[in-house]
Every structure is written in C-alpha cells, then in structure tokens.
Image (spheres, rainbow, N blue to C red):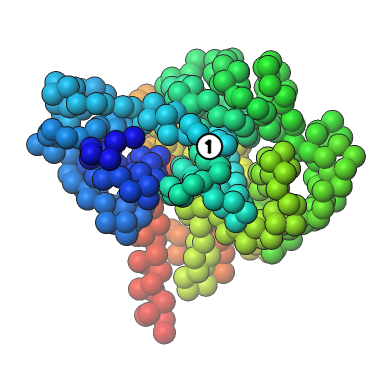
C-alpha cells in the first residue's frame, strides 16, 4: 500500500469496486474513481464518504495514480489503456483484493447464491465481537484499524476468487451459473475445488449440496445443515412471521438456541455457517446470539417498503435457486397475502441455459409478470426473449414496460416482489409512482 499515490477505480460504482474503494478510504488512502453517469444503488456510500466520482474519460488518467480496474471492463477501455501506456501500476479488482487480505484472519464467502447475504451476516456478527474489516457484494465496505478479521465476498465468475488465499472459506453451494463463461457444472466444481486447495485453515460447506460433498482438499471441510451427517446442525427449526428460531449442535455438543429476524430456510443455513466460523475462532456463543438477532440484512436482498395497502420487496435474485429462496422468504413472512413476482431476466445466455428452471421457480408465486431481458455490458443480444420464458409460466407471464405498470394496480393488500440483477428498480419506481398518485387521488 502506498500513501503517496491516488487509487483510481475504473468502474467505481461496481458493487465490489465501491466496497473496496470505501475500505481504502477508511484506511486513510487517497481514493477517486470513474464510472457511468447513471445513478446506481452503490453510489450513496461513495458520496457520503466524500469520494470523487467522475464520468469515464481518459483525461482522468495522469501521473501519480495507481489504477484498480473493474472486471467488467477490458484492457481496451480508454482509461485502462492510457494507464498501461503511461506505465502506471494497474491491478485488476480481484488481484488487489488478494493482496489486501494478507495479515488478517481472512474469511472468504463463495457460492453461486447466498454469498452476499452470508458475507453481510458474518461481517455484522464478527464486527460486534472484534475489530473487523469487510467487503460485501452490495457495495458495502469498511476498513477497520487494527482489524483482527477480514471478511470478503469471493466471486467465482471467471475464477476471480483464485486470486485470494483465505484462512477460512464458507461455500454456500455450487450451482451452474455464468453460462457465458462456465461450460457446465463440472467446470464450476473444478473452480471451487481449485480455490479450496488455496484455503489455509478450514472450509465450512453446505452439507446438502452434492457438489460440495465431493470436495477433495488438504484442509478440513466442516459441513453445516439440517441432517445428522452434518458437523454443524440446526435442529428444532421454528419459522414464523417474525423470523426463525433453532438449536445448534456441533457433533453432539449443544451450542445454544439462536434466533434470527430473517426469512427463508436459506437464512437459517447462512447463520449456521457464521456460527461455525465463530466456534472455530473461539468466539463466545452468547455474543454471537446477540449479534444474530440484531442483523437486518444487506442492500437489495429482501428490502421492503410499504406503500398504500401494498408491500413492495426489492431483491437481487437472478437465478432460479435465488428466486425460489426469495419467494420462500416472502411466504414465511406473509403467509396470508397474495405474492406477485415481477422478474427481469438477466442476460440472454443465462435465460436460455436455465429457461425451464426459471419457469419452475417463478410459478411458486401466485402471479408472475416479466420485463424484457436485461442485456449486460458483456452481452448485448441473444436468440431468446422474455416471451419465450412467458410461454412456460403457468401463473401469468405478461410482459410489463416501464411506461405501463398499470396491470399491477389490480392487486390489493398483497406483496409484489421485484427481482433481478439489472435495472429492475426502474420498473419498481414506476409502479410506486403510479401507486402514490392513486393513493393521493383516493384520499
């Protein structure tokens, strides 16, 4: 780390990039960055920290900078290209993160789904008992002085997590995703197994995942779940409209009764993983209980608001397994209300590869609406449309546009769940505006 340089982030609004920028800022380093001018949910934290965010322009690059390049941008990006031509130090996001975690007790959280929620939960719990730095994939980052722990989200996309060598790893699941890069489940498994052999002390893995059960690695693997073959087990699970309560055992040792104000079975499992890490780091279980109860969740994961007589939920879910988990959580909290799903498919390749699974998960809602497919920076077109997915939806499938969200006005005293990793929030805002005007008119 260099106090003389200015760390310039190319793509600073990216969820991991904004978190990393906040960590360096907290540590007292000079930080700035560039990105698109469109507002994103990550930029509020940057604004509050007083970090200068500029529009992309090669004129931003000058002597005295160390450039950290977001992984969404190729070396042909004007700023990255100019930095390399000038001979400035240039790091990719994941490479820089690999250096940053050295010198701490580091815990990387990986998985096709659940890693952001689990990272946020682990960061919250450990921060309550010891100085902890953390990087969460919802754009939240903190660099704590004299930190004992460094908790970070480990991204499997393009095998980026291989740039890191943590003390511990949590693996929530191995599932086929990112079909623009991975060839299939075996390819995803090989990435996780390679990473597992870089972990120094131990791995905590979900016991019901058949791929994780196959892991071959030199460090101990401790499985968590709800079956008798798991090393850390949740028993006597009680799920209600206020959250979940469960007993935890490590082998035959009773660790205590734990309560979370979170919804869905996946959050019980995420909590188990956190408890397992804390147990091996000899953290007092009573402290863990206290911190778990206080956790409210991370950004864009089951974020709720009430408007008129409707409950609106915003969630990042963009894979069939995530959609299933989000709808399960909504049913737990609102068992007597109608659940309406509004889903924005994210990338053409993912929509084609997982079409039937998307339909199966979405049909768990009482009614389903779709938007057009969100095309990423890497993938602007494809041989599929939302109409193809709509044809497989049993409970609806009507396609909404931003300028006509009125079909949602037919629902009352219900729950609308907006899901997607693109810009689904613009549809949400359009609906909220309609609902607000209607409420004012009726009053």
x, y (%) of residue 346?
Answer: 42, 36
425, 29: nearer the viewer? 29
Q: Is residue 60 left or right of residue 404?
A: left
151, 397: nearer the viewer? 151
x, y (%) of residue 90?
Answer: 26, 26
Q: Quadrant of the C terminus?
A: bottom left
Q: Is residue 435 left or right of residue 392?
A: left
Q: Residue at x 60, y 46 (%)?
A: 122
- In the picture as drawn, the residue positioned furthest to the right comes out as 252
Q: Residues within 10 Å of mark 1 (few under 14, many from 20)?
A: some
Q: Residue at x 24, y 22 (%)?
A: 75
In the depicted structure, whether residue 403 falls above or below residue 96: below
x, y (%) of residue 8?
Answer: 24, 38
Q: Is residue 241 left or right of residue 32?
A: right
Q: Quick check: can you spot residue 186?
A: yes
Q: Which residue is mark 1?
A: 104
Q: Quadrant of residue 275?
A: top right
Q: Quadrant of the N terminus?
A: top left
357, 6: nearer the viewer? 6
Element assignment for label 1: loop
Q: Residue at x 61, y 24 (%)?
A: 200
177, 3: nearer the viewer? 3
Q: Residue at x 75, y 36 (%)?
A: 224
* Number of residue marks: 1
Q: Quick check: can you spot residue 426?
A: no
- In the picture as drawn, the residue positioned furthest to the left comes out as 59
Q: Is residue 309 left or right of residue 87?
A: right
């Amino acid at each position: 780390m260099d106090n003389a340089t200015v760390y310039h982030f190319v793509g600073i609004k990216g969820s991991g990039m904004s978190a990393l920028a906040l960590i360096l800022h907290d540590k007292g380093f000079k930080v700035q960055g560039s990105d698109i001018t469109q507002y994103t949910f990550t930029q509020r934290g940057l604004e509050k920290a007083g970090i200068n965010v500029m529009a992309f322009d090669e004129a931003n690059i000058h002597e005295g900078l160390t450039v950290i390049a977001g992984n969404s941008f190729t070396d042909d990006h004007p700023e990255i290209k100019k930095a390399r031509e000038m001979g400035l130090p240039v790091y990719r996001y994941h490479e820089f993160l690999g250096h940053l975690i050295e010198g701490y007790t580091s815990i990387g959280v990986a998985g096709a789904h659940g890693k952001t929620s689990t990272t946020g939960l682990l960061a919250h719990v450990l921060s309550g008992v010891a100085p902890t730095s953390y990087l969460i994939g919802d754009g939240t980052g903190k660099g704590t002085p004299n930190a004992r722990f460094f908790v970070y989200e480990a991204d499997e996309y393009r095998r980026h997590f291989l740039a890191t060598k943590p003390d511990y790893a949590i693996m929530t699941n191995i599932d086929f995703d990112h079909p623009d890069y991975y060839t299939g489940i075996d390819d995803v498994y090989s990435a996780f197994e390679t990473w597992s052999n870089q972990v120094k002390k131990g791995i905590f893995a979900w016991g019901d995942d058949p791929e994780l059960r196959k892991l071959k690695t030199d460090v101990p693997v401790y499985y968590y779940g709800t079956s008798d073959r798991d090393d850390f087990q949740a028993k006597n699970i009680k799920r209600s409209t206020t959250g979940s309560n469960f007993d935890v055992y490590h082998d035959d040792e009773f660790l205590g009764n734990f309560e979370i104000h979170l919804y869905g079975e996946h959050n019980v499992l995420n909590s188990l993983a956190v408890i397992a890490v804390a147990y091996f780091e000899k953290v007092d279980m009573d402290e863990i209980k206290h911190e778990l109860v206080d956790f409210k969740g991370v950004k864009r994961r089951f974020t709720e608001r009430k408007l008129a007589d409707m409950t609106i939920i915003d969630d990042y879910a963009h894979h069939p397994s995530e959609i299933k988990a989000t709808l399960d959580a909504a049913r737990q909290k609102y068992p007597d209300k109608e659940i309406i799903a509004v889903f924005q498919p994210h990338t053409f390749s993912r929509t084609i590869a997982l079409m039937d699974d998307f339909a199966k998960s979405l049909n768990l809602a009482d009614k389903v609406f779709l938007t057009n497919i969100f095309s990423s920076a890497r993938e602007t077109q494809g041989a599929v449309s939302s109409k193809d997915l709509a044809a497989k939806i049993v409970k609806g499938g009507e396609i909404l546009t931003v300028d006509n969200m009125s079909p949602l006005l037919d629902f009352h005293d219900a729950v609308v769940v907006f899901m997607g990793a693109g810009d689904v929030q613009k549809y949400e805002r359009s609906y909220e505006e309609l609902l607000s005007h209607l409420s004012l008119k009726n009053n």
